């Protein structure tokens, strides 16, 4: 049976030549040539990271219902699992790198690097790095592109490409991720990332703060303090916001009824889902769906 979530088109990393590398680089002009305008204009859930450096032109990009302006010098990060919508104008030019989560693991031999060192969840969707960093990062991107173009399948070349991606991301993370600061702050950041990882797996079951705290091995109060220190929001607010975000995605990008969406997110009664959505999103599901559809 087709579920509500399956109504959102899911885009997977798909390049047979680079399947074992998990990294692809292209210009926006090449993207326009490879994908139809209708496909690019439609909302899509991606299962790999997008890193874009805008070099010419102006446009906007939608990431999880937030519209971000793009201009020369902008850097866009769309993380795996997010829903994006392109608004590609002919004048917009830039360098785009597609990165699977597996590529980051292969580059370090430890899955923790994405959460611990890069902390991609702390990066803004769009930022404007200073000129020196932007120049350095785009130079890294061009070098990466050249090595990808020369790639013929050797394990050494695959490792070089993955390590180049990691170097590029770490260079950016040094500026874009939250400051680590004291050991206490570092521990809070680690706890927060473990919480986010567990929440992403289980949010459709509407877990409690206690449920998630026990799964990652911390007390409920300690977890909430870590969330507040990292984001300014409590763990309960984070859980509610994640469930509401998925509800928004499904309301706009699927044909599922409100009752079906609520049931898929762990609400046994549609009225309870409506009350929850109104409390968190400050509007009703019907009003949100109407306001975000053409």
Image: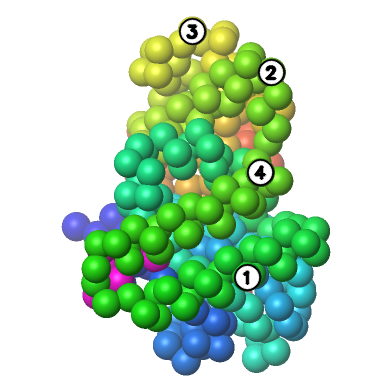
- The residue tagged with tag 1: helix, strand or loop? helix
Q: Quadrant of the N terminus?
A: bottom left
N-terminal label among 4 and 3: 4
N-terminal label among 4 and 2: 4
Badge 4 crowding class, 10 Å Cα cut-off, few under 14, some 14 to 19, many 20 or more, is: few
Residue under label 2: 182
Asked if the residue under mark 1 is in contact with the one under mark 4, i.e. CB atoms within 8 Å, the reply is no
Mark in front: 4 vs 1 = 1
N-terminal label among 1 and 2: 1
Residue under label 1: 139
N-terminal label among 1 and 3: 1
Badge 1 crowding class, 10 Å Cα cut-off, few under 14, some 14 to 19, many 20 or more, is: few
Left or right of residue 104, residue 229 in this image:
right
Residue under label 4: 174
Foreground residue among 257 and 172:
172
The span from disc 4 to disc 1 (Cα, nearest Å) is 17 Å
């Amino acid at each position: 049976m087709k579920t509500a979530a399956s109504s959102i088109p899911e885009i997977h990393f798909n390049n047979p030549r680079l399947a074992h590398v998990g990294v692809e680089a292209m210009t926006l002009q090449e993207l326009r040539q490879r994908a139809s305008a209708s496909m690019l204009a439609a909302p899509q859930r991606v299962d790999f990271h997008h890193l874009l450096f805008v070099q010419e032109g102006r446009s906007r990009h939608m990431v999880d219902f937030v519209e971000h302006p793009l201009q020369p010098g902008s850097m866009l990060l769309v993380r795996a699992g997010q829903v994006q919508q392109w608004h590609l104008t002919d004048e917009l030019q830039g360098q785009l790198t597609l990165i699977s989560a597996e590529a980051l693991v292969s580059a370090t031999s430890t899955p923790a690097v994405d959460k611990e060192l890069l902390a991609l969840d702390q990066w803004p969707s769009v930022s404007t790095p200073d000129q020196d960093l932007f120049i350095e990062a785009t130079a890294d991107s061009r070098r990466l592109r050249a090595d990808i173009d020369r790639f013929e399948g050797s394990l050494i070349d695959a490792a070089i490409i993955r390590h180049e991606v990691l170097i590029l991301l770490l260079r950016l993370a040094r500026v874009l991720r939250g400051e680590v600061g004291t050991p206490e702050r570092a521990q809070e950041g680690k706890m927060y990332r473990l919480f986010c990882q567990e929440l992403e797996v289980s949010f459709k079951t509407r877990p409690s703060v206690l449920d998630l705290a026990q799964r990652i091995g911390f007390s409920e109060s300690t977890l909430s303090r870590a969330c507040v220190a990292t984001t300014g929001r409590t763990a309960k607010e984070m859980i509610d916001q994640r469930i509401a975000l998925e509800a928004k995605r499904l309301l706009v990008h699927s044909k599922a009824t409100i009752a079906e969406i609520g049931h898929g997110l762990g609400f046994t009664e549609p009225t309870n889902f409506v009350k929850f959505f109104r409390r968190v999103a400050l509007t009703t599901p019907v009003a949100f769906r109407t306001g975000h559809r053409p």
